[in-house]
Image (cartoon, grey):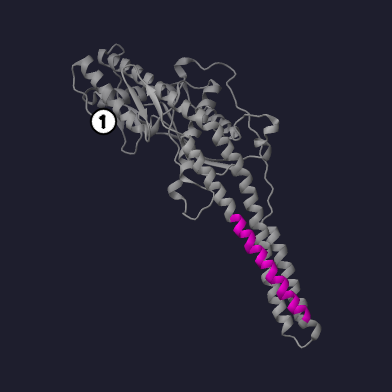
Amino acid sequence: MRALTRYSLLAALLLALAACNTTSVRTTEYTPIARELEPVPEAELLDVGIGIFNSGVDALSKEQEGVFPEVRNAEARFMPYKLMETLQMTGNWGIVRVIPDRQSEMDLWVDAKILQSDGETLRLDVTVSDATGRTWYTRKYEEIATKYAYDIRRGSRQEPFQGIYNRIANDMMAYRHLLSSADVTTIRTVTELKFARRFSPEVFADHLQDDGKGHYSISRLPAANDPLLQRINRIRERDYLFVDTLQDYYASFVQKMEDPYRSWRSESYFETMALRETRRSANTKLIGGAAAILAGILGAASNSQLGQAAGYAGIIGGAYAVKEGLGEREEAKMHVEALKELGASLDAEVQPATVTLEDRTVTLSGSVSEQYGQWRAILHDIYQTETGQQAPVSD
């Protein structure tokens, strides 16, 4: 009888521990965006390039549920555009563009990796650096959405994770305040010289010094009226035009993705909640059932008729609890399959876009980096035509 009592208490303790291990309370506090009180002088505005985010898919285990490569790859293109819109909205920066693989020289670069994105939680690992090779900061950001972010009755169309983009923008501006006017001028000049060196390394290579670790400093400045530099700067203006054209592609992509992606995140949010609750309930029943069976076996082995009766009842009840727990685990698998179907439907709705340029039309399917490669070849042709010099072919 004492053994039965002891193992009954063990079963109760296991049930309590199972409940405690799954209890968590999290809230989301919206971060407003910060703006400069006075307009930033144009000469001190830094241009910002945002790379396509690292989807993080390669680092995921094949068994990790709720993460689908087709969704993550789409998110890796969607999120940089949302950050671009946020930075533009602040008015604290110059040109802000989404540029894959750093294929156009910019004053400032923002790179990020998606650590988690399931509709409930968004976690990003963000690094901000400038043209001189100086890293401003590397920081992890996390935003947790509430169910109200997806409540259609409220009629809200705001990005559920806008707060995370606002915090990135605010941190960038805070670091920008640490720079002097001379620092900003140096960054802008290094960017200009990097672009010039790409087309005419024999002329501009010795204007920049590289320490071998990716840090650049200015060795000497070209003359203000250098005719070659003026021609290269005109080519740079055309490069900006092409970059602007590609933003139309990203805008179209994001517009097409907005509704299905919002629906996916909403469904993913509630599927994640249901999955968590189902697993909690299943684990509780499995642990409790196993403990009840163990106590029942010990009771059935006792010499007391009452203990034996209680033991058999415990075995039957425990077996039923285990069966229920296994059934709920099967239900959990159904939630995972639902997420996979949602991910596949999103991927089907996001299609390649066609961008029309002045003298040609290109279809942007797959990697946009290939289109940048073609454009770089065009810029080199323009340089050769205007200067009569052969520009080196870049990788």
Q: Quadrant of residue 380?
A: top left
> At 67% from the left edge and 33% from the top edge, which residue is drawn?
152
* Residue that lies at the very extreme toward the top in this rendered image: 225
In the image: residue 270, left or right of residue 309? left
261 vs 376, nearest the viewer:
261
Q: Quadrant of the C terminus?
A: top left
- The answer to whether residue 244 is seen in the rendering is yes
Left or right side of 191 for 31: right
Q: Position of residue 16 (x, y in %)?
A: 73, 63
Q: Is residue 294 above or below residue 376?
A: below
Q: Is residue 147 above or below residue 287?
A: above
Q: Residue furthest right?
A: 306
Amino acid type of the residue that numbered disc 1 sits on in the rendered structure: Ser
**Residue 324 located within the stretch drawn in magenta:** yes
Q: Residues within 10 Å of mark 1 (few under 14, many from 20)?
A: few
Q: What residue appears at the point 44 percent right and 33 percent down from the top-left corner?
A: 351
Residue furthest to the bottom in view is 303
Q: How many marks?
A: 1
Question: In the rendered image, which quarter contains the N terminus?
Answer: bottom right
The segment highlighted magenta reads 309-332
> Where's residue 319, x and y in %?
68, 71
Residue 261: image quadrant is top right
Q: Can residue 183 be seen from the camera position used here?
A: no
Does the magenta stretch mainly form a helix, a strand or a loop?
helix
Assign a secondary structure to mark 1.
loop
Residue 308 lies, with reference to residue 360, above or below; the image says below
User: 93 or 10: nearer the eye?
Assistant: 10
Check disc 1 and report the residue beneath it: 394
Residue 15 location (% of width, % of height): 71, 64
Residue 213 drawn in magenta = no
State the image coordinates of residue 67 (x, y, percent, origin top left).
51, 47
